[in-house]
Image: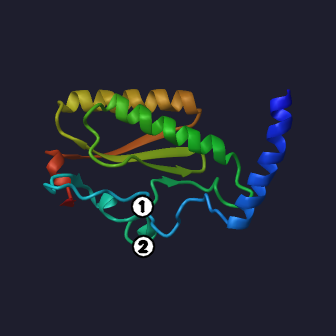
Amino acid sequence: MSFLAKLTPQLALVQAQVSKAALHTSAVCCRVQSGRYRITTKRDRPLTYEMANPPHFIGHRKSWNSWNTSTLKDGLRPSQTAIEDVFIRKFITGTWHALVCSEVIIKRQHNTIRIAGIIRQAISPRKIYFLVGYTEELLSYWLQCPVTLELQTVADKKDVVFKYI
């Protein structure tokens, strides 16, 4: 107990000195790095068009990955919509394992959810039709609204590459 009694005045003295020294502990905000990709030494990392554009071009050269009105002022259930979008993206990438070549775009209109994306033609059309029906049926049941998949196919993943960095 005597140790704490001796330590308290010293802590007050240290706090007073620190406040006079104007020590900043916040992060540096002048360097914007989020959403950008580092250039590799061999310049062999493929980027799609969406990935190649930096975040400040959203709305100019690139689009939003989620289209909904719940984030507007007084919008209904914005947190549930964001969680559902994350769930949909993880379900699509898990169900269509190693087939999705681009970002998954989610569009909500009234009570309908439309999911768009680009997939590879690595499996037979019969399996693709099965996976489309399976995905639409399960997501419709879980989310309690009609879900439609709008998929486009490419022969190879290299067809989606915009540039290498």
Q: Residues within 10 Å of mark 2 (few under 14, many from 20)?
A: few
Return the residue found at the far bottom: 60
Vertical comparison of 41 with 10: above or below: below
Q: Which mark is residue 153?
A: none
Vertical comparison of 64 with 121: above or below: below
Q: What residue is rendered at 55% in x and 38% in y?
A: 84
Q: What residue is rendered at 45% in x and 28% in y?
A: 137
Query: Which quadrant of the structure image shows residue 26?
Result: bottom right
Q: For the residue marked with disc 2, what is the amino acid?
A: His
Q: For the residue marked with disc 1, what is the amino acid?
A: Gln
Local secondary structure at mark 2 = loop
Decide which of 144, 97 is in the foreground and name it.
97
The number of callouts visible is 2
Decide which of 150, 86 is in the foreground and name it.
86
Q: Residues within 10 Å of mark 1 (few under 14, many from 20)?
A: few
Residue 111 location (% of width, % of height): 59, 45
Q: Earlier in the sequence, mark 2 or mark 1?
A: 1
Alpha carbons under labels 2 and 1: distance apart:
19 Å
Q: Which mark is residue 60?
A: 2
Image quarter hosting the C terminus? bottom left
Per the image, the residue denoted by label 1 is 33
Closer to us: mark 2 or mark 1? 1
Badges 2 and 1: C-beta atoms under 8 Å apart? no
Residue 40 location (% of width, % of height): 21, 55
Vertical comparison of 143 with 16: above or below: above
Local secondary structure at mark 1 = loop
